[in-house]
Amino acid sequence: MSESSVTMDGGEVAAASMDGVGMISGAEYAAVNDALAGVHGYETTQELVGQAWDALYSPGNGDVTAGELLTRVRDDGEWRGRVFGHRRNGDRVPVELSMRATDDGVICIVRDVTERRERKRELERYETILETVDDGVYVLDEDLRVETANDRFFEMLSHFGISREEVRNTHLHAVIQREENRASLEDAIHEAIDTEPHTGSFELSAQLPDGETAVYESRFRLDPEPQGEHRGCIGILRDITERKERERDLRAARRFNEELVENAPFSMVRIDEEFRITYVNPRTEEVTGLPDGKESEALGVDIRELPSVAETGEAHLFTPLKDGEIIEFEFPFKSLYGREVYFTGRGVPLMSDGKFDGAVLMSVDISERRQHEKDLERQRDELDTLNRINELLLAVSRDLFESPMHEDIEETVCTRLANSDLYQSAWIGKPEVGGERLVPDVYAGIDDEAIESITITTDTTGQNPGSRAFRTGTTQTSQAVDTDPLFEPWREATLDHDVRSVAAVPLTYDGSTYGLLVVYASRPFAFSQREQRGFEMLGEAIGYAINAKRTRQLLFAEKVVELEVRLSDANEFFVRTDTRLGCQLSLESYVSTRSGSWLLYFSTNDSDVDRLVGAAENESVIDTVRTIGNGEELVLAITAESALLDTIAALGGTVSDGSIADGRGDFVVQVPQSTDISEFVEQLQSMYSGTEILAKRENERPVDPSDRVIGDGFVNLTDRQRQALEAAYRSGYFEWPRENAADDVAELLEISRPTFQAHLRKAENELFAAFFTELEHAG
């Protein structure tokens, strides 16, 4: 208490008081205790002394001012009531004032009633809540007698036929009349005593006047004692009749839904809020191929992590949904048990308290429809691809005949294939000189490093598509590089370059294989049967073009190179047979057949024929052998394979003369002047070790044997016409009686009789037209 000229009686009492105490002199505080300074927010009493009293208080009713209130105290002697005190920071605080006038001034006792006021308000709020909630609230003593409860509690118990007056201070056992209700209560209390946090619940049921049954649920908390007893409890009583009815309805609906789901003709999957599978119906098990007893293996799996979902890129569809949202999906599914299906459907979210709680996925198996669509789509794609291949074939064919060099032909083909969006890259290779492998010569869409890593052998050890294509002369494919067992040695390197399927196309014409076209695609199964047929046509067109270029070089060259070649290799059938039998053969002519073999006409004497025919029939390289003509010299028509003629034809050359005698074969070969003679000789020697070049000379270009001279005119016959005419002539077809019929000659050429006769008629027409035209000119 600060010093002042005014003294306060009972100063020690004021100092010890928990209420604020102050002495008012005039209109100001003359003395105050610490509690009063705290009420007004001052740190020391000295700060409050001298403060105008009417500035520190204001009555709450607004009828009088603080100054008028102070005057009333002096007039009446005392005053008690509530006002607002003003704190130093400007806040108002509710206080109770007790003021008394004395000879020395006015004693003012101030009590801060903020907490009491808040407690009262809180109590009023609780009372309001208790009276407004739809639940009954009650308090029981240790004997389970009702001490107090809200109106709703009494209202609920009235359904048991008990009035409010009877309920008060009544044992709850008496309130609960039905025996099952009492048992439920006692069990709940004993369980609550023995367990933390000493809470429990029980249900009550009552028969209402209208015959309906009301069901109530009570939840309570005990006030336990250490000895296992209790000092009472507080609880709530809630009418759960409607909830029970809803639960019954829900159980019935759930049973109905379960029956519906279990027998639904479509797939239903339940996922939780973390997208884990929690349920699959029998239809799902059926279409995904889940064996009996294995359905649990699908449970707990995150549907987004299923390979069949993740690989589609559609896993992003499964995200938490909002109420009312749905997702629609369509993707293939491959189960762990090998069944592949195609689903389409939608997902409906399940909500709990406004939050995503999972979803139900309903889907239909459209595998058959999808497969049908895929088949149609594939057929359309194949047709489109085939059309594009045909367009490419036409474009390549046009380029082929516009290009003067076969190197340009090869580059054109590879570039066009690699630049199309159908294929990734392409290269053309040809046999290595003196070796047994194909060497890539021209390529496009592939880098040098990848080209250098390619190894394709031409012998029987090679099992990749290129080796098989070169040996068989037919297109070979590997439609799935990653699973083709024959592609194992090359798989890793091929997959590193994103190659998924390969096609190898031989470049052939008239039985000669000039090289190999290899095409890579970045998609599996890129080469359908139709596409392969298109590539076969492309390979034949390229082979024909290469042959035509080389033949054109021979036909239109001013000069040709003529080589005298001696073959003494015993591995060649004719040389081996001549050595063993001592016969002599003279090569009269030869033509290619449709199968890639050669039809050769040899002249010999009668004494050698039978032995030669017998020897030829036992040779694997001989397809057919037939004698033609009669007299001292006979002609043998032999259909056989010949690596010598294959090599010569591949270089655009021809054999103009040939004879086999004394264990060796002497041939005169004419090749274009542009031919690399050393390469040609090296190829021959790699096949026949005993090959010699006896002479080499340059001659003027020979007359095409397809051109027949009549006077000053020419008869231009096609290769097929010339072959048909020559075969008919040498087979005695024009003799009388005929030595061989049309069927026999057609068989020699490996063509049908109508085809042979068509070629023959055209050749005869050309000859007769030239003959009679010449007669007319002469006349």
Image: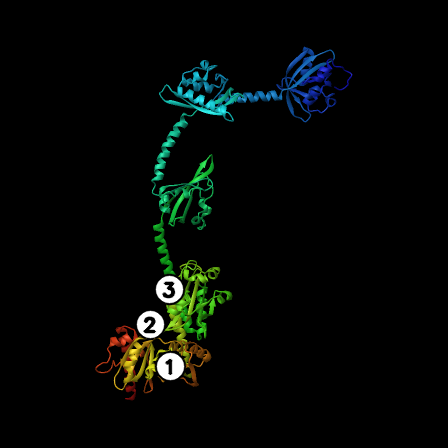
Q: Dot 3: within a 10 Å radius of its alpha carbon, few (fewer than 14), some, or many (20 or more) residues?
A: many
Q: Disc 1 versus disc 2: distance between alpha carbons?
A: 20 Å
Amino acid identity at mark 2: Ser
- Discs 2/3, front: 2
Label 2 or label 3, whichever comes before in sequence order:
3
The x and y percentages for residue 200 are 47, 25
Image quarter for residue 775?
bottom left
| Quadrant occupied by the C terminus | bottom left
Whether residue 136 sits left or right of residue 714 in the image: it is right
Determine if residue 315 is in view: yes
Instruction: Identify residue for label 2.
Output: 595
Q: Residues within 10 Å of mark 1 (few under 14, many from 20)?
A: many
Kind of residue sitting beneath label 3: Gln
First along the sequence among labels 1 and 2: 2
Q: In the depicted view, which residue is nearer to us: 73 or 367?
A: 367
Residue 728 visible to an observer of this rendering = no
Q: Is residue 422 left or right of residue 606?
A: right
Question: Residue 656's spot in the image, x, y percent?
Answer: 37, 83
Residue 386, located in which quarter of the rendered image? bottom left
Q: Residues within 10 Å of mark 2 (few under 14, many from 20)?
A: few
Residue wearing tag 1? 655
Q: Nearer the viewer, mark 3 or mark 1?
A: 1
Type of amino acid under label 1? Val
Seen from the viewer's position, the closer of residues 232 and 123 is: 232
* Residue 754 place in picture, x, y as percent: 26, 73
Vertical comparison of 347 with 483: above or below: above
Looking at the rendered structure, the secondary structure element under dot 2 is: loop
Nearest the camera: 153 or 625? 625
Residue that numbered label 3 is attached to? 532
Q: Residue at 36%, 34% (x, y): give it.
A: 255
Report how far apart the C-alphas of labels 2 and 3 lie in the structure.
Answer: 19 Å
